[in-house]
Amino acid sequence: MADIYSNAYFTISAAESVDCHYGILNRRDASIEHIQVWPPLPDQKGDEVKIFYSDELLPGRIYARRMWSRYQRLWPVDKRAWTFQERILSPRVLCYSRDEIVWSCRCATATELWPSLDPTPGMDALAKALSFDSLFNIDEGSFVEIMTLLPRFLDADDIEEYISDPENIKEYLSDFWCKVVEQYATRHLTFLSDKLPAIFGIATALRSDPVRALLLGAYHWGIFEGTLPRSLAWHTIPSDKRQLFDRSISTSCQAPTWSWASVESYVLFIFTRWESRAKDQCKLVAMSDDEITLRGRVVTTEVECITDNDRMIGFGLPLYNYDCSRKFVRVLWDMSTGLVAQLPKAVTCLLLGYEESHMHDLGGYALVLVPVAIHGRSGVFQRVGIAQRVNRRCFEGVEEMEITII
């Protein structure tokens, strides 16, 4: 897929298509925004207009159309998972929408409303204002910003020209891939078995550069080896909790629990600058198609019910400091509350690392794991969630050990 779309002269996109059976042409809908222009108020300086919506077309008034960037994310084609990599990898796209035809390429956009191939004012200002640093700070729903920056990142011959801290290129690559996954995870799939194939083209393109390929390492189940442990710090969105795939049923899309692809949910990644102290970060020992082995600080605790006025509102974990003082930790579970209640009471927490801050202790993040019984093996676990804002003292004095996650 990476070669097909990257080398295409241009790609035709049926913007209003909800599936592959929908056609390109549509009945034209002008999508007119009804506005009325008023003169400036007497006490205001300069020329200024007031605009408000009306509910009918009247002669003698001015009407405006929405800019394409405002409704592009509403196109049905941009809600489909397979079309995500098609849009990013294609150097030029011709979109047939209900409102108008839109041409988009790496350096310019042209619409029937704005037919010039010069960069439109909005997109030109956007391209100048955004940097690759800002990619990891903008809201996850900023569709136009993401679609503007991702292709430029893939086209960059020298990444160091586009980032403020060249010494941390691997961190930028890790965060870049995580942001790709976040956007992709919001889209809809007809067949769950397509979850990883539908994004594999972008992963292939990202590794097409020898330097990036060396830094990223091997690719397994939607995660690059070189981005660990940062890329393990994902969580589901609370309003969209769904259960993990039933691992007792063999399916073609059965991903290991350490992968974001193992949950039927939107996912978000914890973008943070990890502390550089090696003793506080878990380390990758081995990674294969089915499992990863990490070495880090591990503590065992029990799942406790959280109540409010005798009403259960969820589950959390009590962790104890070296002085035996108790700290209650919030967990972002990978499954619904009902399934959390069925977990074994004892769970294991593997420290991923602490958040870097010169001002105060922001705490750390730890994977929440449950043991798995496998004949002839010990120390094998499945992931069930991630604990956040873990107090540093909870892992002080704890010896490191190796843990395998499947």
Image: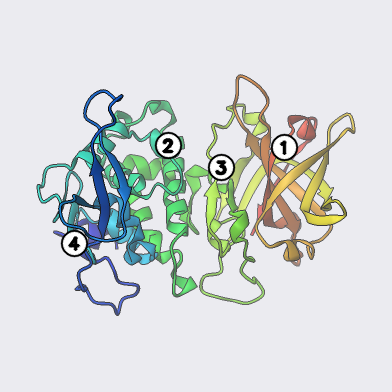
Looking at marks 1 and 3 on the same chain, the residue that comes earlier in the sequence is marked by 3
Q: Disc 2 marks which amino acid?
A: Tyr
Residue 14 placement, left or right of 187? left
Q: Which mark is residue 390?
A: 1
- Disc 4 secondary structure class: loop
For mark 2, does the 10 Å Cα neighbourhood hold few (<14), some (14 to 19), or many (20 or more) residues?
many
> Can you give x and y, in whole percent of width and height, for residue 123 in the image?
24, 42
Real-space CA distance between mark 1 and mark 4, rounded to the nearest whole angstrom = 51 Å
Q: Which numbered disc, 1 or 2, marks the residue closer to the eye?
A: 1
Q: Disc 3 marks which amino acid?
A: Ile
Q: Disc 1 marks which amino acid?
A: Val
Q: Which numbered disc, 2 or 4, marks the residue closer to the eye?
A: 4
Whether residue 66 can be seen here = no
Residue receiving disc 2: 172
Real-space CA distance between mark 2 and mark 3, rounded to the nearest whole angstrom = 13 Å
- Disc 2 secondary structure class: helix
For mark 3, does the 10 Å Cα neighbourhood hold few (<14), some (14 to 19), or many (20 or more) residues?
some
Looking at marks 2 and 4 on the same chain, the residue that comes earlier in the sequence is marked by 4
Real-space CA distance between mark 1 and mark 2, rounded to the nearest whole angstrom = 24 Å
Q: Which mark is residue 270?
A: 3
